[in-house]
């Protein structure tokens, strides 16, 4: 129960009004319009982040990725325009930045992931100038396209941090869009994909196909290269290599950075977190392992899926069904299978649609070999998926046909 200092109390409180928070809040209110729901969200804007890759590649208007949060918020929900700073799950309260507390009967945590720009020395001083850019920000994604358009030859470097980070494919998607642009315009580029990882992708089935894609562009994958410092004015990027005791420095003419990411600090330091700082929910039911009236979804949870809006689309109905069941005194009936999808833009015009569930099992929506980059999937990425996202945050997650499917081990013909 909430303490006497609690400023207000609601039946269901959401922390975060992004993809996960609004998808669940809207769907809950459709099923039970009388629910007393509050969404705590500090931002005036809601962003369709998956299109920032396309913005960086010159294939999408940045303005179309932003909507007023007020227009996305379900009408019956109370919007508390504040930042959460702490959780007191034993008291069923949350603390806000303004010092007030909010009480709840049920809590849904969907606060996203934290971008740790500061962990790369020199990055914040040079981001947005000197050819240093990142699609991981509304402010800088348009600058990526400026860098690509103005590139007159030389070395282009694309980085990927150690996991976890949102959208497992985004660091290399922009490499392919840039490489395609350079190829079409006859610009000679030495391209490097410097990844902290040891493979092109976490799921071997797709990784082998992506090795072919990068090879066809003549770009070099530099494995176990973790960006640690950027000197913008002198155009130098420094990487910790291998066991991180050695470093190497690369000159660049253009540098696309994906920042290291972690659980938001206010979650890391709370009783809701596991040892690594993520909201400790069960990987199937998405219910908190210790606090039975708490659920979580999206990028801030400990579930071992790829952190994507596609995952949120499958998680949201599970949270809705399980939360309503728990409210009615029943056990959670639904289980999330770890589905995530990553539309890899292998060129301006084609997408390789990587879809998988827990354990790296291949689970596409359609019975077509998903390692083949297709024009139909480019159409989906640029047209259908944005519409599906905006519908999802209004409580309409759309169709889902994903299922585990078998494909021959031998690679199909891959033409990015
Ligand atoms: P978010 O949508 O980020 O929402 C979190 C919300 O919590 C935000 O509104 C934030 O303001 C709020 N919040 C933060 N701190 C607090 C606080 N202290 N108190 C209250 N509220 C707070 N996904 C795909 O499916 N396909 C893709 O192709 C794809 N590409 C991507 C490309 C890029 C460049 C990026 C950046 C992301 C991409 N994603 C993609 C990932 C996708 O956008 C995220 O996985 C998804 O938005 C996660 O939803 P979420 O609700 O967990 O977090």
Image (spheres, rainbow, N blue to C red):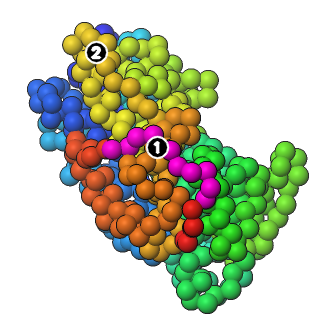
The answer to whether residue 115 is visible is no
The secondary element bearing badge 1 is classed as loop
The numbered dot on residue 326 is 2
Residue 48 appears in the figure: yes
Which span is picked out in magenta?
401-411
Q: Is residue 406 magenta?
A: yes
Q: Percent from the top left, x then y, of residue 342? A: 48, 53
Query: 33 or 314: nearer the eye?
Result: 314
- Residue nearer the viewer, 384 or 367: 367
Q: Which percent across, then down, holds residue 46?
A: 33, 52
Mark number, residue 129 = none
Instruction: Indicate which disc residue 405 carries.
Output: 1
Q: Nearer the viewer, mark 1 or mark 2?
A: 1
**Measured Cα–Cα span from mark 1 to mark 2:** 33 Å
**Residue shown at the point (38%, 52%) measured from the top left:** 366
SS type, badge 2: helix
């Amino acid at each position: 129960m909430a303490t006497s200092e609690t400023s207000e109390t609601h039946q269901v409180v959401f922390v975060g009004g992004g993809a996960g928070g609004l998808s669940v809040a809207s769907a809950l209110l459709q099923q039970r319009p009388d629910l007393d729901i509050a969404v705590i969200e500090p931002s005036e804007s809601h962003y369709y982040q998956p299109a920032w890759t396309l913005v960086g590649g010159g294939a999408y208007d940045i303005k179309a990725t932003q909507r007023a949060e007020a227009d996305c918020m379900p009408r019956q929900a109370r919007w508390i325009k504040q930042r959460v700073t702490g959780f007191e799950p034993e008291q069923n309260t949350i603390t806000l930045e303004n010092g007030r507390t909010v009480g709840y009967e049920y809590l849904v945590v969907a606060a996203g992931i934290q971008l740790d720009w500061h962990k790369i020395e020199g990055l914040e001083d040079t981001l947005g100038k000197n050819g240093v850019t990142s699609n991981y920000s509304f402010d800088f994604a348009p600058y990526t396209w400026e860098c690509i358009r103005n590139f007159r030859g030389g070395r282009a470097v694309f980085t990927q941090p150690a996991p976890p980070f949102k959208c497992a494919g985004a660091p290399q998607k922009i490499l392919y869009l840039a490489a395609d642009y350079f190829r079409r315009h006859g610009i000679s580029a030495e391209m490097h994909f410097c990844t902290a990882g040891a493979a092109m992708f976490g799921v071997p089935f797709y990784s082998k196909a992506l090795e072919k894609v990068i090879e066809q562009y003549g770009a070099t994958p530099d494995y176990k290269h973790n960006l640690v410092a950027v000197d913008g004015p002198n155009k130098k990027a420094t990487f910790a290599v291998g066991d991180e005791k050695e470093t190497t420095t690369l000159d660049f003419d253009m540098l696309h950075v994906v920042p290291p990411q972690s659980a938001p600090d206010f979650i890391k330091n709370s009783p809701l977190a596991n040892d690594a700082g993520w909201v400790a929910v069960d990987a199937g039911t998405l219910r908190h392992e210790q606090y039975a009236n708490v659920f979580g979804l999206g990028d801030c949870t400990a579930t071992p899926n790829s952190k994507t809006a596609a995952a949120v689309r499958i998680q949201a109905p599970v949270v809705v069904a399980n939360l309503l069941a728990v409210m009615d005194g029943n056990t959670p009936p639904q289980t999330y299978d770890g589905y995530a999808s990553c539309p890899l833009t292998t060129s301006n015009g084609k997408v390789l649609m990587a879809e998988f569930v827990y354990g790296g099992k291949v689970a596409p929506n359609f019975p077509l070999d998903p390692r083949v980059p297709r024009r139909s999937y480019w159409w989906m990425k640029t047209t259908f998926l944005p519409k599906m996202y905006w519908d999802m945050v209004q409580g309409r997650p759309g169709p889902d046909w994903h299922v585990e499917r078998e494909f021959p081990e031998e690679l199909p013909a891959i033409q990015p």
